[in-house]
Each structure stands twice: as C-alpha cells, then as structure tokens.
C-alpha cells in the first residue's frame, strides 16, 4: 500500500504540458527526449531560499549536462513578466537553460509542486526519478546548517546516470510555499 502511495505521489499528471519560455520557444519540460533526463527547478524571484540556490542549480546543470540532463527554470509567479524573469536569471547568474513563467500553473499542477525551490527529475520514460530539495543546507525556514551533509539531487542524478535505482526518490523541500493562482488574482 505504501509503495502504491509513493508511486501515486511521484506520477506526473500530464507529461504533455506545453509551455512557452521567455524567448517564445515552445517547450515540453515534463517530456524529455529519448536518452535525456529533465530537471525542472521551481523557483520564485522573491524567495530568498530559492535565490540562494541559483549558483548550485547552475553548477548541477553544467556538471550533468554532458550526461544528458536538460534543465528548466520555472518561475511560479504568473504575473512575472518574461523580461523580468530573464533579468532575474541573469542577475543571479543562472545558466543558459530555458526560463519559463508558469502563467497557468500547468507545470505546478502536473507535478504537484508546493515549494520553491523544488526540483523534479524526470526520465525519458516520463517517470519521476526524484522530487524534492536540492540539498539539506536549509533544515527549516530560517534555519541553516553550517555545511551541507546530504546532496539529495546530486545523489539522485548520480544514480540515474549510472543506471541505478535512486535510493531516496523523494525528500521534503524547504522554501517558500507556492500560492494558488487566486492569490495572484488569476
């Protein structure tokens, strides 16, 4: 029963979601191409924890890019303009991966994302290999560790790219809650 519950929580409700990035290019980040793996990073421009992780997100995307990782940065505030998203990503030195403003929360809904930052790793068979935090630097809101002791996302990616089972496919992300669309006046 517990295994079925975990599978239900890890499933993407609609892998065929199409969104447009800030450059106007249509994307399907929940549907990686054959031989590729997607990492979908849910972020918020006004979340300090989300902003803290910008450099680590970039390092991860660069390190695993040659192995077939395709990253997408998803801004959850539907009122954020494309220009503001592009500027924010540049100011925080994010990499060249696509920036998407999730205007209808199609990606939030399909993944059931709840917090920023939160990452979903999706295999080319559309299964979720990992869902959760990047690492354990933040223990709780306002409470940080002196050093990172668990690199959950990196551990999951190492397992995926070596053909192994992800030992910890889910972790609890710590960050800013993603409000419903109604909170944005949508």
Image (cartoon, helix red, strand yellow):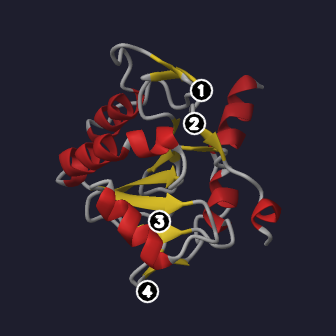
- Whichever of labels 3 and 2 marks the residue nearer the N terminus, that label is 3
Nearest to the eye among marks 4 and 2: give it: 2
Residue on which disc 1 sits: 141
Disc 1 + disc 3, Cβ < 8 Å: no
Residue on which disc 4 sits: 24
Residue nearest the observer in this picture, 119 or 141: 141
Point 74% across, 33% down: residue: 5
- Whichever of labels 4 and 3 marks the residue nearer the N terminus, that label is 4
Disc 2 + disc 1, Cβ < 8 Å: yes
- Point out which mark residue 1 bears: none
**CA–CA distance between discs 3 and 2?**
22 Å
Nearest to the eye among marks 1 and 4: give it: 1
**CA–CA distance between discs 2 and 1?**
6 Å
- Whichever of labels 1 and 3 marks the residue nearer the N terminus, that label is 3
**Image quarter of the N terminus:** top right
- Whichever of labels 4 and 2 marks the residue nearer the N terminus, that label is 4
Nearest to the eye among marks 4 and 3: give it: 4
């Amino acid at each position: 029963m517990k295994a079925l519950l975990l599978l239900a929580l890890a499933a993407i409700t609609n892998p065929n979601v199409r969104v447009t990035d800030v450059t106007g290019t249509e994307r399907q980040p929940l549907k990686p191409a054959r031989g590729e793996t997607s990492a979908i990073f849910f972020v918020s421009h006004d979340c300090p924890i989300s902003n803290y992780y910008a450099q680590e997100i970039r390092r991860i995307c660069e390190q695993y890019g040659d192995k077939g990782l395709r990253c997408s940065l998803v801004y959850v505030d539907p009122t954020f303009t494309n220009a503001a998203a592009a500027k924010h990503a540049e100011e925080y030195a994010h990499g060249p991966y696509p920036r998407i403003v999730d205007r209808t929360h199609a990606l939030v809904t399909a993944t059931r994302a709840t917090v920023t930052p939160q990452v979903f790793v999706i295999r080319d068979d559309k299964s979720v290999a990992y869902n959760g935090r990047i690492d354990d630097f933040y223990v709780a809101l306002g409470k940080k560790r002196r050093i990172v002791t668990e690199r959950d996302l990196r551990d999951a990616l190492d397992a995926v790219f070596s053909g192994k089972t992800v030992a910890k496919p889910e972790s609890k992300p710590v960050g800013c809650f993603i409000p419903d669309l109604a909170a944005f006046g949508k």
